[in-house]
Amino acid sequence: MSYFMTDEQALLKESVTQFCQAPDTLEAIAYDNAHPGEFPRKSWDALANAGLIGMSIPEEYGGQGQTVETELIVSEVLGTFGYPALANLAGHQLGCAVLYYWGSEDIKQKYLVPCAKGEKVCCGAATDPSGSFNMTEWGISYREEGDEVVINGQKVVVTNADTADVKVIFGKEEGGNTQSCAFVIEKGTPGVSNGGQEGMLIPGPTDWGTIFLEDVHIPKENVLRGGPEKINMWTALGFNAGALMSLTIGQTAFNLAMKYTSERTNSGRPLNQLQKVAHRLVDMATVIDICKASIYTAARLWDEGRYDESVRLSFMNKAFTTEQMSKVTHDATVLHGAVGYNPQTMVSVLNAMVVSTEIAECPPDILRDMIAETYGIDPVWKAGRP
Ligand SMILES: Cc1cc2nc3c(=O)[nH]c(=O)nc-3n(C[C@H](O)[C@H](O)[C@H](O)COP(=O)(O)OP(=O)(O)OC[C@H]3O[C@@H](n4cnc5c(N)ncnc54)[C@H](O)[C@@H]3O)c2cc1C
């Protein structure tokens, strides 16, 4: 499917494909993959040098001024190649979206510009030890002291936790139950420290861990205010991009299953000529293409300024695609028979990886509440929010 790409987008897709296959890039990828538990600095820098960070941020704020749709086309190519810094880019974008949609002009110039260029790394830290969306029990607190606010608390399982030069940390009003503000905290600020790296089911080159905040002083202007609409503005784009990451895993698993079932035989014929196998492959292809169409539709709606429609569809895409891709990679694994249970086969790695796309950012169970909200149904756990 072409997804109605413009000539310019098709050219960009081709050049990103060439970038992923270039000897220097392959060297950077190999180096980073050989260093699990570390921020993939070489492949990050390669992305920055190629101008592939901050794609949809306007040029006056250090980005490329492209559409969200174009940004997704680039991410899809990177995902297809299993590009090491892609998860870090997703974490970076969570923080950058807040700087862009919630930040003042000064905040944008000071923090967003270097982040959009990839000179600085950002993170978006929402997950509290008590739960990512359990705002009523969040332990983070802050108080005002003159021109500053003083923050105490902790955030866990944050992508780029240690590396991030600009840490965007979500807070809430006292007694509130929604993430209504975000603190912009520079790396090295007294009172900010990190825990060790979290272990992952499939260890990869990433930086994923805890941020401790102990009496951290920041200027009042570094407290950005959200509110329900603005919150959707930062979550929706990230959720739709998360759906796309999941889709690239499912697509790769499907391609592997197609290859395997066309090569392995049963009764002298390829496995994929057995009707049950062929139908399973068709079911996988069907959800992949439908999810892909929906993800790009959400991006186009956003680019056309139809935010409410885009937000709802992005929530749906994150919930539906990640659940469906878990099924697709499961089926691709089963079609490999015992070979699929060997940890050294790619399909088994994908099968273990895909669950992270379901959990990360927002699990489908919580997303269903958010979708219900777009229909005017207020989830009980959010009752009484400010
Ligand atoms: C690879 C990876 C990268 C991540 N990167 C980041 C990051 O950069 N920044 C960040 O802040 N976080 C990050 N996270 C954390 C992620 O956002 C959370 O793990 C996720 O939102 C779930 O929160 P939790 O782990 O606290 O689960 P819990 O809140 O404990 O929930 C556990 C389960 O209970 C159910 N549940 C909980 N609450 C509700 C509800 N209200 N309604 C219905 N069901 C519910 C759901 O099934 C949920 O999966 C990352 C996670 C992963 C796996």
Image: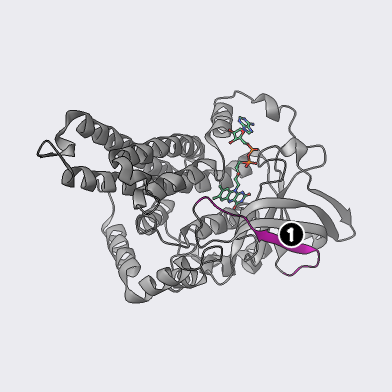
Residue 77 located left or right of residue 237: left
Could you say where residue 221 lies in the image, as x and y percent from the top left? 76, 59
Residue 196 located left or right of residue 326: right
**Residue name at image x 31 percent, y 60 percent:** 13
- View extreme (right): residue: 146
Could you say where residue 18 lies in the image, as x and y percent from the top left? 29, 68
Locate residue 284: give its quadrant.
top left
In the rendered structure, which segment of residues is drawn in magenta?
A: 188-201
| Residue where numbered disc 1 is placed | 222
Residue 21 located left or right of residue 226: left
Could you say where residue 265 lies in the image, as x and y percent from the top left? 15, 41
Quarter of the picture holding the N terminus:
top left
Q: Amino acid at mark 1?
A: Asn
Q: How is the image coloured?
A: one colour
Question: Is residue 154 depicted above or below 380 in this figure?
Answer: below
Q: Is residue 299 visible?
A: no
Q: Is residue 119 visible?
A: yes
Residue 262 colored in magenta in the image: no
